[in-house]
Amino acid sequence: MESKAVFKGVTNNELRKRILSAILETRGMIPSFKTFHQNMLYLGITAYVVKTYIVDRLGKESIYKALSRIWHRNRPTASWVEHKENTFRRAPGPPRLTLDYQTLVVSALRLFACISGTMPRSEPGEPRIHTTIDRSYQVSFLRKAQRLGFNTPKVEQKLATMNDAAPIDQDDLDSDQIPDLEAALLKRRCGRPFARSYTTIKNRLFLPQLCAEPEPSTYPTTLFIQNDFIRSCHGWTLSAPNPRESWRQIIHQVLGDGAH
């Protein structure tokens, strides 16, 4: 931090001190400032998507607090789990803010290349990937926000300007044949994913897959890395003493019901 090797864009010394103080107060292990920095940049994509599509500004609120306020205002009658693109199953019991929040965050990460203007990192030796925005995925994300209890005037305004775009049809996607790639190189285990890893993310990053027991592998896989990132930066829940198990129990119940 003192040499400005990380967070180079933050030039205000007082703000840098506050960032350092927050880092030092973080519970858990940070492998290195480089990986922490890369993951914070990746986390920033979620904040950008939320500000672009759902709220006008976050101010000093965290993403969770801003979306929590919206969710409580809308008072949804049920929570939903997305297990394929635009295919949902109703969660048993009362609506759960943390479940809807996680579903939305996972969706933002899964679709970031289609809705944020930020692209995956190019594979070594391959041409740079050009930025693209897909209106079908934009509509899909906005409608997810409405279903999950995060509807706002901004969501409705954006949808009103996209009447000519249809949400992506999950039948157009074939995720069963997409492998969960292993990341042998350390640089592939943090930050914005590389293009080949993003193919896995776009097709397979859903809560049921994240809650499933990982298959044995020599190196961490794409889904394992995304699971670790989401748990570290977003938290599976704010209250359950054993969050992974609580989500697994919920997902197990949900998968026994019908799809919608």
Image (cartoon, rainbow, N blue to C red):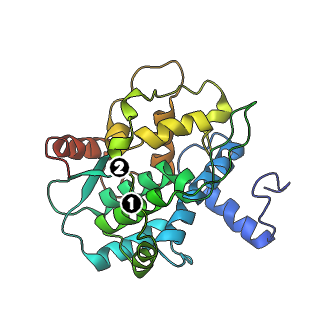
Determine the image quadrant of residue 194. top right
Residue in the picture at 53% in, 46% down: 28
Residue in the picture at 47% in, 20% down: 217
Image height of 42 relative to 201, above or below: below
Measured Cα–Cα span from mark 2 to mark 1: 8 Å
Q: Can residue 259 be seen from the camera position used here? A: yes
Question: What secondary structure is found at the residue carrying circle 1?
Answer: loop
* Residue linked to disc 2: 169
Determine the image quadrant of residue 141. bottom left
Label 2 packing within 10 angstroms: few (<14), some (14-19), many (20+)? few
Residue in the picture at 30% in, 75% down: 72
Circle 1: residue type: Ala
* Residue linked to disc 1: 166
Residue 237 screen position, x and y as percent: 35, 55
Q: Can residue 62 be seen from the camera position used here? A: no
Circle 2: residue type: Asp
Image height of 147 relative to 193, above or below: below
Residue 37 screen position, x and y as percent: 68, 50
Are the residues flagged by discs 2 and 1 in contact, CB closer than 8 Å?
yes
